Image (spheres, grey):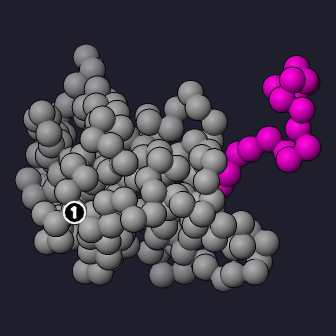
Amino acid sequence: PNGRRRYRRALIGVARKQGKTELAAAISLYLLLADGEPSAQIYCAAASEEQADYVFEAAKRMCTIEGSPLSELVTVESSRITSKGDPYSYFQRLSSKGTTKHGSAPHGVIFDELHAWGVGQADELWDALTTGSGARDQPLQIAITTAGTDLQESRCGGLYQHGLAVQRGEVEDRGFFFRWWAAPDECDYRDPEMWK
C-alpha cells in the first residue's frame, strides 16, 4: 500500500538448467539500474568464488553483448559493474572473506546455490550481507538454488523449512517470498510421465 517492496527476502528453488543464473543476473542489474536506490550496492555471494562468478559473468554478458542497450548505462570492469548514471552504484561478486564486508550497505544481495552453503560456513560474510542493509529503503535478499540434501546442516535447509511454514500458514512473514518447484514425494523418477 505504501509503494514499497513487499518482499525483502526470498528463497527460490528450481531444478538444474532452468535459467537460475540468468534470472539472478537480470534481477541484479534491475536493482542496480532501475530500482531507484541511490548509491546502490548489489552483491552476489556463493559458497565458492567460482560459483559467485557465474552470476557476475552472466550480468557482464548481458551488458556487453553486441547491441545491448545496457552497454550505454554501465561501465564493465573485471570485478565490478558500475552505473554511469550514479557512479556510486555498483554490482560485484564477493569473495568468501566476510571480515572485509562489514562496512557495506547492500541494497541487493543474490545468494547463489544456497544449498551448498553450510551452517557455520562463511558466517561473517553471511552476517555482513544479511544485516548490513538497515539504512536502505527497500533492500532485497534473494537466495536461488537447486535442491540440496541436508535440511539440518545447510543455510538453505533452514530457509526452506521457514518457507514451508509460511506457505502452510504456521508462521507469518509477509516479507518472505518462497517458491519451490519439486516433484511430489511419491514421484517414481523412473516413470517418463513423471519427467513431464
Q: Would residue 189 appear left or right of 12 to someone viewing this image?
A: right
Quadrant in which the C terminus appears: top right
Residue 192 position, x and y percent, is 88, 20
The quadrant in which the N terminus is found is bottom right
Which residue sits at x=74%, y=44%? 182
Secondary structure, magenta segment, majority class: loop
Judge from the rendering whether residue 20 lies leftward or rightward of residue 82; answer left or right: right
Type of residue at label 1? Gly
Q: Is residue 17 above or below residue 127?
A: above
Q: Would you say 74 lies left or right of 30 here?
A: left
Left or right of 150, for residue 6: left
Q: Nearer the viewer, residue 32 or 109?
A: 109
Q: Is residue 131 magenta?
A: no
**Residue 154 at x, y percent in the picture:** 52, 58
Q: Per the image, is 189 magenta?
A: yes
Q: Residues within 10 Å of mark 1 (few under 14, many from 20)?
A: some
Percent of width and height locating residue 45? 32, 51
Residue with the mark numbered 1 = 98
Q: In percent of the image, x 59 and y 32: which residue is there?
A: 16
- Closer to the camera in the image, 101 or 74: 101
**Range of the magenta residues?**
179-196
Residue sitting nearer the eye, 164 or 106: 164
Question: Total label count?
Answer: 1
Does residue 170 appear in this view?
A: yes
- Name the image quarter holding residue 108: bottom left
Q: Is residue 28 visible?
A: no
In the displayed structure, 141 sits above or below 73; it is below
In the image, residue 172 above or below residue 71: below
Please tell me which residue is depicted at 8% across the width and 53% down the height of the picture: 87
